[in-house]
Amino acid sequence: MNRVLLIPSRPRSPGQIRRTLSAGWVVPTLCLLLAAAWAQAGTKPASPAPPASREASRPPAPSESAEAHLWGTVRTVRDATSLVVVTPELTRYDVRLLGVEPPEPPRPGRSGVQPTEGQPFGPEAATYLRDLVVDKQVQLDTYGKDHLGRTLAVVWLGDLSVNLILVKEGLAWVSPNVPVTKVRVALEVAERQAQVGKYGLWVLPNPEPPWEFRKRHRLPAE
């Protein structure tokens, strides 16, 4: 956009105007005034910027590429999907395994929530994960955070995906909504292998997905 530089003239007193007229500058002065008026009339005001479209205001879709690749040591396993990783710089990450839904563990009763016995293989899944990664060095491929502020990640133990191992061993389902295609596809293949081999929870005649179990018992997701 071309900018128009307007230089304001200094205001003159009535005495200065009279001296200008008496000096014979009537015609040049009128010409200058008319030229300034025409120039101002021919200058269009800048049009306002168009409002941002709704598409521009939408949050970006999840990226297929990891946001970061971090190294650290697993200090704690809270349950079958949650662990604490500390980097060499002593940065602490509360991590949630991306795309994995283990059986619901037993829950104690609390305000507004009845105690539940949990699902088969729930405690076994947590124990398996604890034995697998506690005090081990792992790599995190991170993909944002969940509603509790935990870092969503694929956790690598050497060349092995911990997320994949849990599903392949029949200790977890694939989450119904995995935003990263390459992660979801790999997990779905592992789940099918566990079903065919009847590993873990797939030995049960009709294993109930944990999200259906929570819905039936009116349990919040954790």
Image (cartoon, grey):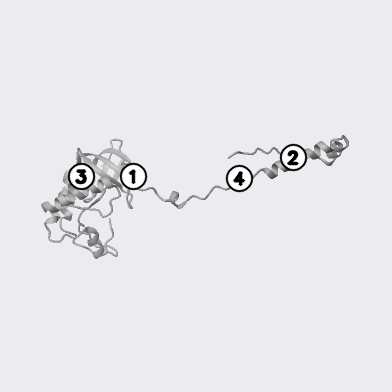
Q: Label 1 belongs to which residue? A: 63
- Is the residue 218 above or below the residue 24 in the image? below
Separation (CA) of disc 4 from disc 1: 38 Å
Name the one closer to the observer, 114 or 163.
Answer: 163
Which comes before the other along the chain, label 4 or label 1?
Answer: 4
Q: Label 3 belongs to which residue? A: 162
Separation (CA) of disc 4 from disc 3: 58 Å
| Label 4: how many Cα within 10 Å (few below 14, some 14–19, many 20+) | few
- State if disc 2 and disc 3 touch (CB < 8 Å): no
**Amino acid at circle 2:** Ala
Which comes before the other along the chain, label 2 or label 1?
Answer: 2
Q: Which of label 4 and label 2 is nearer to you?
A: 2
Q: Which of label 2 and label 1 is nearer to you?
A: 2
- State if disc 1 and disc 2 touch (CB < 8 Å): no
Q: Label 2 belongs to which residue? A: 35
Q: Label 4 belongs to which residue? A: 46
- Is the residue 70 above or below the residue 188 in the image? above
User: SS class of the residue under badge 4?
Assistant: loop
